[in-house]
Structure formats: structure tokens, C-alpha cells
Amino acid sequence: MANITIKGIPEKIYDQLKLRAKRNNRSLNSEVIISLQLHAYRSGSASTKVLDLARKAQAMGKGFLEDEELQSAKSDGRK
């Protein structure tokens, strides 16, 4: 397994990571690894499509998704 050192982490981000680690009963190292994994898996995935659809609906002034759009977003997210 690889090791890295991260320098220059903004204090606010560091504090948020420490808080999340404590809430999740994990070490800071484990919390950082999980955060990186979640980001890596989400990038370019179906969740991006769902967010894009939600933003389009919001931009159209609806403020919500129609049932058909919501069902479509759900099924796209499960693929």
C-alpha cells in the first residue's frame, strides 16, 4: 500500500476531517482515505448525471423534479 504526505491543508478542512473522523469513530488517516475513495468513485459517475438533472430542473424554475424525472434519475443512479 502506498503512503503520501499532504502539506498545506487549510485549517478549516483539517478541522472538518478531524470532526468527521471522531463522529465516524475512525482515525484521521482512515477518514481521509474514505473521503478520497468517495470522491474518486463519484467523479464522472451516475451521481453526476443526477446532479446535472437536478440543476437543470432548478434552472427551469421548477424547484423540484417531476415524478417521471425523479424515477429516471433513480434508475440511472443504480446502473
Image (cartoon, rainbow, N blue to C red):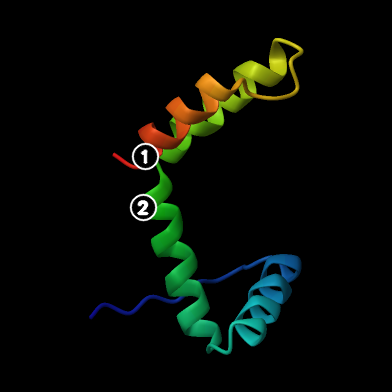
In the rendered structure, the answer to whether residue 38 lies left or right of residue 1 reads: right
Q: Position of residue 43 (x, y in %)?
A: 40, 43
Front residue of 48 and 72: 72
Which residue is painted at 55% across and 71% down in the image? Answer: 7
How busy is the neighbourhood of tag 1: few (under 14 within 10 Å), some, or many (20 plus)? few
Front residue of 8 and 78: 78
Q: Position of residue 22 (x, y in %)?
A: 65, 87
SS at mark 1 in the image:
loop
Q: Residue furthest left?
A: 1
The quadrant in which the N terminus is found is: bottom left
Q: Which residue is mark 1?
A: 45
Instruction: Specify the amino acid type for callout 1.
Output: Ser
Above or below residue 47? Residue 2 is below
Which residue is painted at 74% across and 71% down in the image? Answer: 11
Instruction: Specify the amino acid type for callout 2.
Output: Tyr
In the rendered structure, the answer to whether residue 25 lies left or right of residue 30 reads: right
Q: Which mark is residue 41?
A: 2
Q: Position of residue 40 (x, y in %)?
A: 38, 53
